[in-house]
Amino acid sequence: MLVELSNLIKEKNEVESKIAKIIGRPANIGHIGEYIAATIFLIQLEESATNKGSDGYFTAGELEGSTVDIKLYSKRQNMLDINPRALPDYFLVMTGPKTGLTSSRGTTAPLCIESVYLFNARELIPALKSKIGIATSVPAALWEQAEIYPHQNNNALILTEEQKKLIGLFNSLDPSLY
C-alpha cells in the first residue's frame, strides 16, 4: 500500500505543478479559490497572498472598489473563517455540497463548486451569535440569504449567464466521491 500511495502522491504533485503554473501560486485550495473568483467575478487580487482582511477588491459593477475575502471550501458546513481584526467589505464563499459536521474518517473532499455566497461583513458580524474567528458558525438562514449561485437570493451581485457558465465548469462532480 505504501508503494501505491507513493505513486499517487507523485501523480498529485504533477497535477498540482500544472495548476500552479496556471494560477501563479502554489496549488492549495485557498489560492485556487482566489484565482477562480478573481477571474469570474472581476476581482483584483492583492499582490501579497498574506494581506490581512481581504484578498482583493471588485473592479467592476455595483461592488467596484469593495474589498473581498475569498473562501473556497470543499464542503459547506455552515462555518466561515473570519478575522475580526481585519474585516473586508464582503466575504465571497464558494463551496462544495452541504454536509453536516461529522468525522472526516472514511470520506473524501473533492474540490468542486456547487454554491456561491456573498456576505456583507457589516451585516453578517452583528447577526452572529457565536464566537468570531476560525470556523465561525453561521446560521443556515444567513447562508440562504447570501446565496448568489445556483439561486440568486442575494441581489448585491447579480450574476451574468457567462459567470454562471464559468462557475458550472467546477460543478457536477460524481456524488459518490462524497
Image (spheres, rainbow, N blue to C red):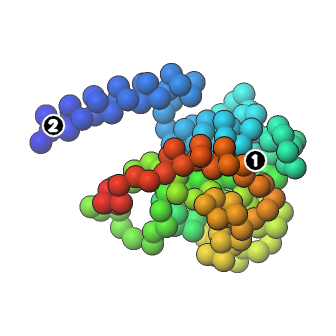
**What kind of element bears circle 2?**
helix
Q: Where is residue 39 in the image (x, y as percent from the top left)?
A: 66, 36
Is the Cβ of the residue at disc 1 closer than 8 Å to that at disc 2?
no
State the residue at coordinates (45%, 48%). Answer: 111
**Residue 63, visible in the rendered structure:** yes
Q: Where is residue 177 in the image (x, y as percent from the top left)?
A: 32, 56
Name the image quarter holding the N terminus.
Answer: top left
Toward the viewer: 55 or 93? 93
Specify whether 23 is left or right of 1: right
Residue 91, quarter of the rendered image: bottom right
**First-in-chain label (1 vs 2):** 2
Looking at the picture, which amino acid does disc 2 mark?
Glu
State the residue at coordinates (77%, 55%). Answer: 158
Toward the viewer: 106 or 136? 106
Residue that carries the numbered disc 1 in the rendered image:
68
Q: Position of residue 60 (x, y in %)?
A: 84, 40
**What kind of element bears circle 1?**
strand
State the residue at coordinates (57%, 68%). Answer: 78
Looking at the picture, which amino acid does disc 1 mark?
Val
Q: How crowded is mark 1: few (under 14 residues within 10 Å), some or many (20 or more)?
A: many
Residue 125, quarter of the rendered image: bottom right
Q: Is residue 117 above or below residue 72?
A: below
Mark pair 1, 2: CA separation: 41 Å
Q: Is residue 120 above or below residue 71?
A: below
Q: Residues within 10 Å of mark 2 (few under 14, many from 20)?
A: few
State the residue at coordinates (45%, 69%). Answer: 99
Which mark identifies residue 4?
A: 2
